[in-house]
Amino acid sequence: MLDLAGTSSIVTGGASGLGEAAARQLAARGAGVVIVDLQDDKGVKVAGDIGGTYIRADVSDPEQVIAAVGAAEGLGPLRTTVCAAGIGWASRTVGRDGAFESAHDLAAFQKVINVNLIGVFNTVRLAATAMSRLDAVDADGQKGAIVTLASIAAFDGQIGQAAYSASKGGIVGMTLPVARDLAAVGVRLNCVAPGLIDTPIYGEGPASEAFKDTLKRDVVFPKRLGTSDELASMILELLTNSYANGEVVRLDGAARLAPK
């Protein structure tokens, strides 16, 4: 098992939701965590709560991610990274009026790919580079581990999810080849594809609760949305289990999404 005590970790998107839950569990295992996000107030609070550091950074910007890596190295050897930053976008590919102008906005599609897919690869390549410079922690030559977050939308994309599903499908598709690449430097890479997880993205109040209740229709068992802590637990398992590599794990209560 990869021991996290006295090490450092980077969590992109760590200021809220799934990333925050992962950051808190990493800190509880003894890691010094660098929260990478664009939500300054939330990022500073989470970092303060867990004794970590907040770095404002766009994950698709190489220099900003390198700065985050440097901050992590200041806390201890960078052994783990979680790529949880991402954005959503809903739009049909074509409009109903036959006009070119009503087709899916290309700039929006490019932005989602840039953040969700290119941003993940950028983080992986730079964090893994820093890990490659470390001494191995075991006889296998293990130096570190990375977990990316995709989505079951990579497999069951719904109407209006072309951009989001394409970005998450890209993360799934690069998991094995990147894991094979990183084997040469002793770094493992795995991916979690969450299903319907109860996070602040759904809002609060009666309307939000009613909406979340309708989402349960596609979940087999348990008949509810997952929790951030359940997802974070899977992330921690993949980070610390030394034989987990090149895997995409669906965490979704056996949900298969309907078209809409």
Image (cartoon, rainbow, N blue to C red):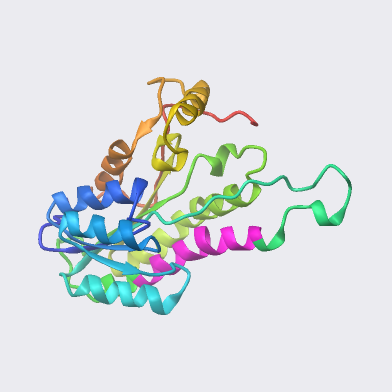
Q: How many numbered tags mark residues here?
A: 0
Look at the image and tell me in which quarter the C terminus lies: top right
Residue at the image position 17 percent from the left and 55 percent from the top: 50
Q: Is residue 98 left or right of 161 when viewed as pictured?
A: right
Coordinates of residue 194 in the picture (x, y in percent): 42, 40
Q: Quick one: 208 or 100, which is closer to the camera?
A: 208
Rendered location of residue 66, percent (x, y): 35, 77
- Name the spot of residue 89 as percent of width and height, x first: 59, 50
Q: Of all residues shown, which one is farthest toward the bottom?
A: 63
Q: Quadrant of residue 10?
A: bottom left
- Which segment is the magenta one? 108-126
Q: Main secondary structure of the magenta part?
A: helix
Q: Is residue 125 left or right of residue 54?
A: right
Residue with the most extreme right position: 98
Whether residue 149 can be seen here: yes
Who's the residue at 88% across and 52% down the image? 99
Task: Look at 40% across and 79% down and name the residue there.
Answer: 63
- Name the residue rendered at 74%, 48% in the picture: 93
Placement of 231 over or under 30, stated as above or below? above
Decide whether residue 116 is among the magenta residues.
yes
The single residue placed furthest to the front in the displayed view is 205
Q: Quadrant of residue 188?
A: bottom left
Q: Is residue 240 visible?
A: no
* Front in this rendered view, residue 75 or 156: 75
Q: x and y percent of residue 201 in the render? A: 45, 43
Q: Is residue 254 magenta?
A: no
Position above or below: 76 against 28: below
